Image: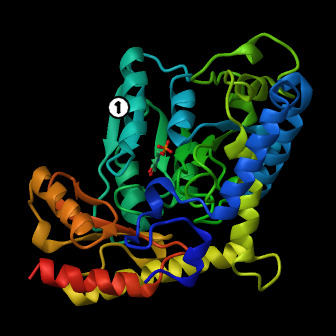
Amino acid sequence: MASPLADHWTLRSDIDYLNHGSFGATPRCVLAAQQAWMARLEQEPIEFLAPERTLLPKLDQVRKLVAEHMNASPRDVVFVRNATDGVNAVVRSIALRAGDEVLITSHGYNACNNAVRYAAERAGATVVTADIPFPISGPDDVVDAITACLTPRTRWMLVDHVTSPTGIVMPVDEIVDLAHARGIRVMIDGAHGPGMLQVDLQRTNPDYYTANHHKWWCGPKVSGFLFAREEWQDEIVPAVISRGANLDGFGDTKFQANFNWPGTFDPSPLLALPTAIEFLSGLHPQPAGCGLEALMRANHDLVVSARRLILDRLGIEEPVPESMLGSLATIPIPAWRDCTSDQIKEIGKRLRDEHRFEFPVIRFADSIGCLRISAQAYNSIEQYQRLADVLVRLTA
Ligand SMILES: Cc1ncc(COP(=O)(O)O)c(C=O)c1O
């Protein structure tokens, strides 16, 4: 049984949905707000959508809210469709040269790593992959693996804030310090950051940070943001070059003008984001003003308890220290070690079709069969208890 809070979402009740991490899930009130924005747009499409009329101030209000939550200046924030879009815009804009090295990690998100490979190949640069262990004993394993890959030719790196296959919260502050001490620029792929972690861009100080609104902030699909430090903004070209590239009136800065108008688009997911943040903040109203923090803590605590009970029932060692978890957790299942991709797919299918669970079952590093659980307000510990029961039977 899901949590009583699940009534706020439209998720099916006959599946235990433990996969908030993939595409998020949008609460009813946020969908209603989005519908209301769409209805307003359709009442007067030109007045609503034309950048020279009333669109830009509406975007700026959302930008201000996003920047506040990220502890950044709104001037340094633009909107993108999603984190893949944000990574593409940056990596395809930076001036890589033949012989340069760019660094990604073995826990990186495939789509974004592909964008890095594409940009590097076109420039004659080399992609170096830092092999981060899994299981992992602590943040030093990450820092050491990255440090071992740095050379005087390293120019740029892409590191996830929270890794997609393994659910690890990376020590991004240390990584940025390490890179900056060597003159290397760092992009953080924070697809999972907002709503899962306290992101503080002033403290972390990355060169670029991109994230999704539709994951842990529960915004409607699709929307996200890209942050870039002022000194790099002029060189960043969006994936879609549009009117703002040479016309006035599309934004306060060249960076914003380039991204504010990606061609005719539906701004309703963005405009409904404040409703999503307000809703999530209201789930834990006490102490006043700290609702989102309390939700993040509750989700973290739930995933930690859920992981603990599965690890204990299956007799598995902790693969990642609790301090490196947000609200995702990946558990390697010994019985699935060395399963083929087809076998892993079959296990995932059985878990969904026969046992009515939704979460990813993956093969990490070509041999480690794992499952990844998420915890969001609509989940309850009973759902993970049922999962542990099923896993005990399936792996006996
Ligand atoms: C670390 C990371 N980066 C990027 C993405 C891509 O997100 P999107 O498909 O919304 O661009 C994901 C999606 O799960 C992710 O986990």
**How many residues crowd mark 1 within 10 Å: few (<14), some (14–19), many (20+)?**
many
Image side of residue 12 versus residue 390, left or right? right
Q: Is residue 316 above or below residue 24?
A: below
Q: Residue at x 47, y 41 (%)?
A: 158
User: Is residue 58 among the parts visible in the rendering?
Assistant: yes
Instruction: Quarter of the image for the N terminus: give it.
Output: bottom left
Residue at 43% from the left image edge and 38% from the top image edge: 112
The image quadrant of residue 287 is: bottom right
Q: Is residue 214 above or below residue 375?
A: above
Q: Mark 1 — residue?
A: 127
Circle 1 — which element?
strand
In the rendered view, tell whether residue 321 sits above or below residue 178.
below
Residue 133 % position (x, y): 28, 60
Give the percent coordinates (x, y) of residue 383. Answer: 38, 82
Q: How many numbered callouts?
A: 1
- What x and y, as percent, mark residue 222? 58, 43
Q: Quadrant of the C terminus?
A: bottom left
- Please identify the quarter of the rendering in which residue 242 is found: top right
Which of the 4 image quarters holds residue 75? top right
- The residue under label 1 is which amino acid type? Val
State whether residue 16 is above or below residue 167.
below
Q: 319 or 298, which lies in front?
A: 298
